[in-house]
Image: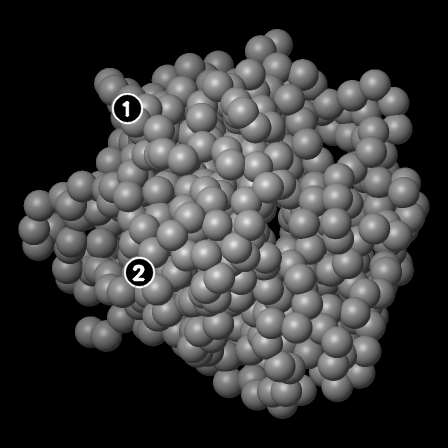
C-alpha cells in the first residue's frame, strides 16, 4: 500500500516578474524594521491595517497587512516590518485592534469551507513560543471565531521564560495561511540579564548592530505588485496543499543584500515561510549554533547548514573576519532525507558583502559555554500517540488531520496534568515532513524511530486515517535515532519526518497564577495543513 505523497497543488499560476537579485539592503531593526514603541509603561497597542511597500525596485508597491504600533509605520521598508523587544520577567499588556477590511480582498483567496464566518476577515494574534495563559495565547480552541473589524484582542505576555526569539503572527481559524501570507507576522525578541543585545555582554557574543534577525519567507508576485496566492483547480475548492513562492524575501524585501564588517556576527534566523523547509548554508563557512526556539543552549554546536522547517529558529554565530572584501551568498538547498518536501527549488536567499573595515572589534572567539540549557527532562508519567494523516489527495474532500479527527471533532483527547512530564509521539502516516508545533510548552526531542507506516496503517485504519492512541512500537524497523546535534535545547517545533515516529517530551507547567484547566492547540506549522485540518486542542488539567 502506497502512502499518500503530499504534493504541490494542481493549481498553476504565472511566475513572478523577473526580479534581479541583491539590489537593496536587508531591512534591519531601526532601519526598515520598526522597533515597537510602547503606548504606556509595559503596554503596546497595535492596529492591524493595510499598507503598501515596494519590496523590490522592479515591483510596484505591494499591498500588505501590518501591525502598526501607532507610529504610522513610516520606518517600515518591507513586509516583515515590526519587532517587539521584551525583557524576561517583565510582563507586557498588548492589544491588537482589527482595522483591516471586513471581508477578504481579491488578492487573498479565502476558502469559505474552512473559515467560521465565510469571507469575513477574523483575526487573532498568537505569540509563537509564548508561555502564556490560554486566554492570552491567541488560540483557536479558545476563540474560534477570532476578532472582527473594529474589535480588539487584549493579551498579557508574562515573559516568565528565558531569552529567545519568539514571533507573533495571526492564527485565525481556517485562515492562518492567508493572514500570515498577507503580512501579519512580527518578531518578538526576549532579552534577559545575560542576553542583553548589547556589546560587550556577559556571554561574550556579538551585540548592537552585529546581532541581526533574519526572517526568511517565500512569496510570489503579480505584475501589479500584489502578492500572488494560487487557488486550487479542484472544483469547489480554493485551498491548496502548500504555498511555495518563487521569490525569497528576507526581513520583507526580495533577495536583498547585507553589508557586514570582517568580524563576528550573531544571526537570529526564523523560517517564516508558509510551507517551505529551508536548508541554508554559506558555502562551507562554519556556523556555530547557540540556541533554537526555546532559547540559548549550554554550549555552542558547530554546524555546516541550518535545516529549518516553518517556525523553526536558529541562533547562530558566524565569523567573517577572514573574509575581508569577499561576497557570499546565503543559499537554500533541497533538505536531505529523511526530511521530505514537495517544494520546487529556490536556491538564492541573500547576498552578504564583507567590507574591509571593522568599526567595533567585538568578540573574537566562540564562547566555550553559554548561560542556557540543554533539554533534559525525566520521568514522563505517560506517553500519548498522535497520528498524522492525509486523506483524499487531489479530491474535493482532501484534508489532513491529527488522530483521524477534525480540529473540533469530539472531546479533547490530550489532557496532560499540570506540572507533569509527558512523552508525545507524532506518528507520521504521510509522505512528507510535518513541523509539529505545541503551544504553551517547549520540549525536548527524544528521538525518531523508523517504522513500517503502511503496515501500522493497514492494521489500524479508521474512517479518516489511523485514530490516536495506538502505539506504533510493534511496527518499528530499527532502533530510535537520537536527536540531531542542533536539537540540543528546548524547541517548540519539531520535524516529524515520513517513515518515522517522532518522540518529544514536555513539562506541562502553567505561568505563575494561572490555574488549570487551560486549553491550547498543537498543530502542523505548514500553514496550509494547519488550516485544513492538521490541528487539535489539548487541555492542561488539574
Ligand atoms: Cu503538515
* Residue 118 spot, x, y in % from top left: 76, 63
For label 2, the SS is loop
Q: Residue at x 35, y 64 (%)?
A: 283
Look at the numbered disc 2 and say if its residue's Cβ is closer than 8 Å to ligand 1. no
Q: Is residue 182 left or right of residue 502?
A: right
* Residue 258 spot, x, y in % from top left: 59, 59
**Residue named by callout 2:** 284
Depth check, front residue: 134 or 18: 18
For label 1, the SS is loop
Q: CA distance from mark 1 to mark 2?
A: 31 Å
Depth check, front residue: 62 or 369: 369
Mark positioned earlier in the residue sequence (1 or 2): 2
**Residue named by callout 1:** 376
Judged from this view, the residue extending furthest toward the top is 513
* Above or below, 538 relative to 454: above
* Residue 51 spot, x, y in % from top left: 86, 60
Amino acid at each position: 500500500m502506497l502512502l499518500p505523497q503530499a504534493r504541490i497543488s494542481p493549481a498553476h499560476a504565472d511566475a513572478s516578474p523577473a526580479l534581479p537579485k541583491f539590489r537593496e539592503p536587508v531591512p534591519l531593526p531601526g532601519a526598515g524594521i520598526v522597533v515597537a514603541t510602547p503606548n504606556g509603561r509595559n503596554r503596546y497597542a497595535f492596529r492591524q491595517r493595510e499598507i503598501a511597500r515596494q519590496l523590490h525596485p522592479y515591483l510596484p508597491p505591494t499591498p500588505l497587512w501590518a501591525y502598526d504600533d501607532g507610529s504610522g509605520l513610516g520606518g517600515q521598508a518591507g513586509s516583515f516590518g515590526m519587532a517587539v523587544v521584551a525583557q524576561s520577567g517583565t510582563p507586557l499588556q498588548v492589544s491588537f485592534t482589527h482595522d483591516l477590511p471586513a471581508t477578504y480582498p481579491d488578492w487573498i483567496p479565502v476558502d469559505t469551507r474552512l473559515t467560521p464566518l465565510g469571507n469575513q476577515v477574523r483575526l487573532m494574534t498568537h505569540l509563537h513560543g509564548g508561555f502564556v495563559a490560554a486566554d492570552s495565547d491567541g488560540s483557536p480552541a479558545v476563540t474560534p471565531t477570532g476578532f472582527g473589524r473594529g474589535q480588539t484582542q487584549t493579551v498579557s505576555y508574562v515573559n516568565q521564560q528565558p531569552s529567545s526569539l519568539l514571533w507573533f503572527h495571526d492564527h485565525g481559524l481556517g485562515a492562518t495561511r492567508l493572514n500570515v501570507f498577507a503580512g501579519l507576522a512580527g518578531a518578538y525578541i526576549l532579552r534577559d540579564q545575560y542576553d542583553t543585545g548589547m556589546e560587550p555582554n556577559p556571554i561574550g557574543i556579538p551585540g548592537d548592530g552585529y546581532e541581526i534577525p533574519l526572517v526568511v519567507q517565500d512569496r510570489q508576485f503579480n505584475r501589479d505588485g500584489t502578492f500572488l496566492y494560487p487557488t486550487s483547480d479542484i472544483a469547489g475548492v480554493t485551498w491548496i496543499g502548500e504555498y511555495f513562492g518563487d521569490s525569497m524575501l528576507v526581513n520583507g524585501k526580495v533577495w536583498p543584500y547585507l553589508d557586514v564588517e570582517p568580524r563576528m556576527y550573531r544571526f537570529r534566523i526564523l523560517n517564516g515561510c508558509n510551507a517551505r523547509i529551508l536548508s541554508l548554508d554559506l558555502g562551507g563557512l562554519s556556523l556555530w549554533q547557540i540556541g533554537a526556539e526555546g532559547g540559548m543552549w549550554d554550549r555552542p554546536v558547530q554546524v555546516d547548514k541550518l535545516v529549518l522547517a516553518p517556525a523553526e529558529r536558529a541562533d547562530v554565530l558566524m565569523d567573517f573576519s577572514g573574509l575581508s572584501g569577499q561576497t557570499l551568498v546565503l543559499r537554500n538547498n533541497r533538505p536531505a532525507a529523511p526530511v521530505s518536501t514537495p517544494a520546487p527549488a529556490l536556491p538564492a536567499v541573500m547576498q552578504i558583502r564583507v567590507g574591509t573595515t571593522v568599526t567595533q572589534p567585538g568578540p573574537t572567539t566562540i564562547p566555550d559555554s553559554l548561560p542556557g540549557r540543554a533539554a533534559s527532562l525525566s520521568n514522563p508519567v505517560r506517553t500519548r500517540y498522535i497520528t498524522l494523516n492525509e486523506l483524499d489527495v487531489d479530491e474535493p474532500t482532501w484534508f489532513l488531520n491529527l488522530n483521524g479527527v477534525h480540529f473540533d471533532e469530539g472531546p479533547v483527547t490530550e489532557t496532560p496534568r499540570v506540572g507533569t512530564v509527558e512523552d508525545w509521539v507524532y506518528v507520521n502516516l504521510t509522505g512528507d515532513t510535518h513541523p509539529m508545533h505545541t503551544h504553551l510548552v517547549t520540549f525536548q526531542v527524544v528521538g525518531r524511530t523508523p517504522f513500517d507506516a503502511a503496515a501500522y496503517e493497514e492494521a489500524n485504519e479508521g474512517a479518516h486515517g489511523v485514530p490516536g492512541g495506538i502505539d506504533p512500537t510493534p511496527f518499528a524497523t530499527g532502533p530510535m535515532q537520537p536527536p540531531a546535534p542542533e536539537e540540543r535545547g528546548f524547541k517548540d517545533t519539531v520535524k516529524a519526518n515520513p517513515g518515522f515516529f517522532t518522540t518529544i517530551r514536555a513539562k506541562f507547567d502553567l505561568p505563575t497564577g494561572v490555574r488549570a484547566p487551560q486549553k491550547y492547540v498543537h498543530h502542523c506549522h505548514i500553514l496550509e495543513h494547519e488550516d485544513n485540518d492538521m490541528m487539535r486542542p489539548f487541555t492542561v488539567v488539574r
